[in-house]
Image (cartoon, grey):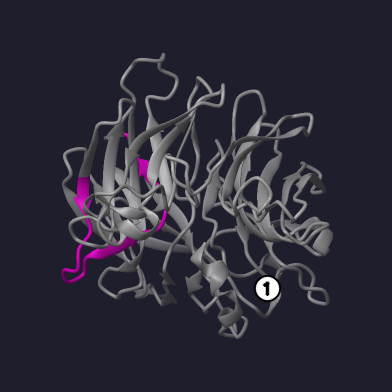
Amino acid sequence: MRSFWLLGAILVSVASVGVVQAAPMNLVFSFQNPLQGQMPTSVIGDEQGNFYGTTLQGGGSGKGVVFKIVPDGSEQILTDFPGKNIYQPNTPLVRDAAGNLYGTARCGTTGCSNEDIIFKIAPDGRFSILHRFSMQDAAGYYTWSHLTLDAQGNLYGTTMSGLVNANDQAPCSTTGCGAVFKLAPNGSMTVLHRFEHATGFDKSGGFVLFGGGLLPGDNSEFYGTTESGGPGGYGVVFKISADGSFSVLHSFGDGSGEAQNPSSNLVRDGNGNLFGTTAYGGDYRYGALFKVKANGAYTLVHSFGGDVKGLLDGQNPEGMLAISKTGDIVGTSPFGGNGNGVVFKVSPKGHEKILWTFAVTGHDARYGIIPDGGVWIDAQGNLYGTTLDSGGPKKHRGTGTVFSLRP
């Protein structure tokens, strides 16, 4: 979500030039009215053709909403955040088999000490707070990473900062470096691992659970990333077990062409290889797609920022990655292309195809700009995502869109 903070500088975007788009695009929804929400951050779907997501702003208080787009294209507001105490939902939603939605949001001074919460929205619309983080919470605070849900209803995630221990070293000695946590359905919180500089900090991109659905006590493994820290200083890929056993699979450094600062969730292919993106580093310093094997072997798959068969590549990728049935890695970059972001597809061998280049002028401007939330992929391989700004009819540009793309 770093592109949200840079949005003011992006309002003077590069004008569109003629681009032959590689895949059919469809406008699912355009946020035209502030009460509908503004600046959508990501979207997920269900088997009935509904889509769920959050906005950083808009709604009755201007502090964000949780929305649902039904198959006829209309919007339902599931939660309109009041703004004073709960505001700015900041991570992708997750949905369980019963239709409950889970996410995180900021929490104000009343009862939260200005940190974060984990919330739940039931199918009937009931909103509840499952956990309130605080500076005294052993699990840390500031949950800017994805949540992961297992079949037993446990939620897993990471925090950016945390309770400081006496033996913490800089920079963790000031605000702590966060933790990996588990939140059980009964509300009990377990800290699986506390981060320190040597093992990475500044959690970004969340982590992926493999072996979900195993009975309690079985050894599920978790894989994740940190945006900074680690032996190389630019983040790590890590593995953690259900009992908290922790190991670093790869540390990102400052070598020539090295990927730096992981910026997405991890995805896994049928051979157990992990793929992710970094916001910086690579051959052009605009980010990279990397692969890490189960044994920690690392490969830089693709460097963003170059030329792709006559098209300008994306820059600084972030948001949710997806993996297609053919093993291609699909995602978004909020920058690059014509200056307004792209949707990309990269094969495991590093062959990239720009699926869509976003534009501020012309017909394609209706689909919005700055796609920083990544993509969600359905069973047929269709892609769905959001843009942070613009979109909609020419005479009334909105503040973000939900789009679909058929690769």
From the viewer's perspective, is residue 374 above or below residue 98?
Answer: below
* Amino acid residing under circle 1: Ala
Viewed as shown, does residue 151 lie left or right of 173? right
Asked which quadrant contains residue 193, the reply is top left
Whether residue 400 is in magenta: the answer is: no
From the viewer's perspective, is residue 222 above or below residue 64?
Answer: above
Q: Residue at x 66, y 71 (%)?
A: 364
> What residue occupies the far front of the structure in this picture?
166
Q: Secondary structure at mark 1?
A: helix
- In magenta, the rendered stretch is 249-270
Q: Residue at x 77, y 32 (%)?
A: 126
Viewed as shown, does residue 296 lie left or right of 279? left
Give the number of marks: 1
Q: Dot 1 corresponds to which residue?
A: 365
Quick check: can you spot residue 166? yes
Viewed as shown, does residue 181 lie left or right of 200? right
Quick check: can you spot residue 326? no
Q: Residue at x 37, y 74 (%)?
A: 305
Whether residue 254 is in magenta: the answer is: yes
> Residue 15, percent across and down?
59, 85
From the viewer's perspective, is residue 18 above or below residue 73?
Answer: below
> Residue 207, percent across and down?
40, 42
Label 1: few (<14), some (14–19) or many (≥20) C-alpha neighbours in 10 Å: some
Q: Residue at x 68, y 56 (%)?
A: 55
Asked which quadrant contains residue 366, the reply is bottom right
